[in-house]
Image (cartoon, rainbow, N blue to C red):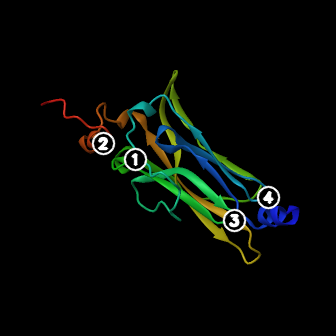
Amino acid sequence: MRNLIYLLLVTTATTVADYCNEHKVPFGMEVHKNGNVNILCSRPNCHEKKYAECPERATSTSCATNSSWVGGVTQHADGGLRLMCCEYDLLPTYSTIQYEKLTIRPGEYFEGDEQMEGDTVTAFDLIGNIEQISDPNGNYTYNLLIYRYHCGRIPDQPPAWYMKKQWPYWDEKK
């Protein structure tokens, strides 16, 4: 019986997950020397005006649209990375590309900047996409797409589509 339990533990695929979800944004990423990936999440003081929609799980290999950012990662035992892509239709309007392919290797990390005016965050960096690249030895490096998000451009009211996607939704005008 003990051998069966040991065999199950050894052969069971493990995954490591790290999520910001729609409540925070990914401002950094760390790749440990052993290859494990962590994303760093934050909620800048202007984030309460942001209206994003995130799926329940990280299932994509890329957040390739210009209206998405990485809301979470799942790393499988084989090293493969899956992304949770949070959608925000107005991201291209309120952000600019800061870095198109910022390379992170094992043992390295990236931490985004915040622009401040007094005690108020006026802009911050967030990870729009993570591209996983494998070398012939099976080691991974990662190219990050980094957006600079400009807080002063965010609307005070959520877009109409956002309100209709919230559950339960009641039309208060009736």
Q: Residue at x 65, y 59 (%)?
A: 75
Quarter-of-image position of residue 14: bottom right
Q: Which residue is mark 1?
A: 53
Name the amino acid, label 4.
Answer: Asn
> Residue 102 versus residue 17: which sits nearer the camera?
17
Farthest right residue in view: 2
Quarter-of-image position of residue 79: bottom right
Q: Secondary structure at mark 1?
A: loop
- Give whichever of discs 2 and 4 has the lower sequence position: 4
Quadrant housing the C terminus: top left
On screen, residue 159 versus residue 50, left or right, reads left
Name the amino acid, label 3.
Answer: Gly
Return the x and y of residue 64 as percentages of the image width and height.
Answer: 45, 62
Residue 34 numbered mark, or none: 4
Return the x and y of residue 56 as percentages of the image width and height.
Answer: 48, 51
Distance from disc 2 to disc 3, alpha carbons, whole Å, reads: 35 Å
Question: Is residue 101 shown to the viewer in this render?
Answer: no
Distance from disc 1 to disc 2, alpha carbons, whole Å, reads: 8 Å
Residue 162 numbered mark, or none: 2
- Which class describes the residues within 10 Å of circle 2: few (<14), some (14-19), or many (20+)? few
| Tag 1–tag 4 contact (CB < 8 Å) | no
Q: Secondary structure at mark 3?
A: loop
Q: Residue at x 31, y 35 (%)?
A: 155
> Residue 158 versus residue 97: which sits nearer the camera?
158
- Give whichever of discs 3 and 4 has the lower sequence position: 4
| Tag 1–tag 2 contact (CB < 8 Å) | yes
Distance from disc 3 to disc 4, alpha carbons, whole Å, reads: 10 Å
Farthest front residue in view: 1
Compared to 76, does 42 lie above or below? above
Question: Is residue 127 shown to the viewer in this render?
Answer: yes
Distance from disc 1 to disc 4, alpha carbons, whole Å, reads: 32 Å
| Tag 1–tag 3 contact (CB < 8 Å) | no
